[in-house]
Every structure is written in C-alpha cells, then in structure tokens.
C-alpha cells in the first residue's frame, strides 16, 4: 500500500472545511478518513503552541490582528459613550 502525501495547503483547507461543516462531512467531500483530520488538527495545535491566547486554530495572524483591531475600536467607542453618559448623570 502506498502512502499519499497531501500538501500543506490541502491540509489547511481540509481543516477549515472540517471546522465549518464538521469532520464527517469534510471527510466525505474530500475522500479522507476522519483520523487524518484529527491527526492534522493535533499536529497543527502542537506546532502552533506559541500562537497568541484567544487566536482560533484556523485563523491566520493577519485575521487575528484584524479581529483584535475591530474589537479595540468597538470597545473604544463603547468607552466614549459611557464617559458621555457619566458626564450627563453627574451634571443632573
């Protein structure tokens, strides 16, 4: 029996598909065995042990940064609204 080697891009795409649709569905679509997806997921998790806390497994560093910047802007806006509300309440 020969062993088929899959590219890194294929594995990443397969993991994203499994994240969205579930491992069983992804395996059925891609012709893989479920243990392959689980092995790739485990390998990816161990190789990314240095990733920032809160970063999703299938998220790139750019996506993570963009998501955090969006959260910061939302929190800054909420903080500004709360400061104005406090000023209004104190001024009563």
Image (cartoon, rainbow, N blue to C red):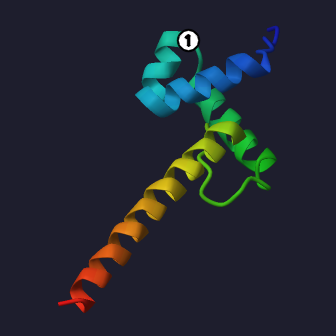
Q: Is residue 92 above or below residue 36?
A: below
Give the answer, above or below, for where 82 lies relative to 38. below
Residue 69 as seen in the image, left or right of residue 39: left
Q: Is residue 46 left or right of residue 84?
A: right
Compared with 40, 9 (above or below) is above
Quadrant (top left, top right, bottom left, bottom right) of the N terminus:
top right
Q: Nearer the viewer, residue 80 or 61?
A: 80
Identify the residue under disc 1.
Answer: 30
**Secondary structure state at the residue bearing disc 1:** helix
Say few, some or many: other residues with alpha carbon within 10 Å of mark 1 (under 14 / 14 to 19 / 20 or more). few
Outermost front residue: 91
Where 91 sits versus 1, above or below? below
Number of numbered labels in the structure image: 1
Query: Is residue 42 in sight in this rendering?
Result: yes
Position in image of residue 7 (x %, y %): 78, 16
Residue 78: horizontal and vertical position, in percent? 38, 64
Residue drawn where x is 62% and y is 51% of the image: 55
Tell me the residue at 42%/70% (across/down): 79
Q: Position of residue 31 (x, y in %)?
A: 56, 10
Q: Residue furthest left?
A: 92
Which residue shows up at 59% across the image and 17% down it? 32
Can you say which quadrant of the picture contains the C terminus? Answer: bottom left
Residue at the image position 69 percent from the left and 23 percent from the top:
11
Q: Horizontally, is 89 left or right of 41 in the view?
A: left
Can residue 57 be seen?
A: no
Q: Position of residue 65 (x, y in %)?
A: 65, 46
């Amino acid at each position: 029996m020969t062993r088929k080697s899959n590219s890194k891009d294929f594995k990443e795409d397969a993991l994203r598909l499994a994240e969205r649709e579930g491992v069983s569905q992804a395996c059925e679509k891609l012709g893989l065995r479920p243990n392959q997806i689980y092995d790739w997921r485990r390998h990816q998790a161990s190789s990314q042990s240095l990733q920032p806390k809160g970063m999703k497994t299938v998220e790139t560093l750019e996506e993570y940064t963009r998501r955090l910047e969006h959260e910061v802007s939302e929190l800054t806006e909420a903080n500004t609204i709360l400061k104005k509300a406090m000023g209004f309440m104190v001024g009563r």
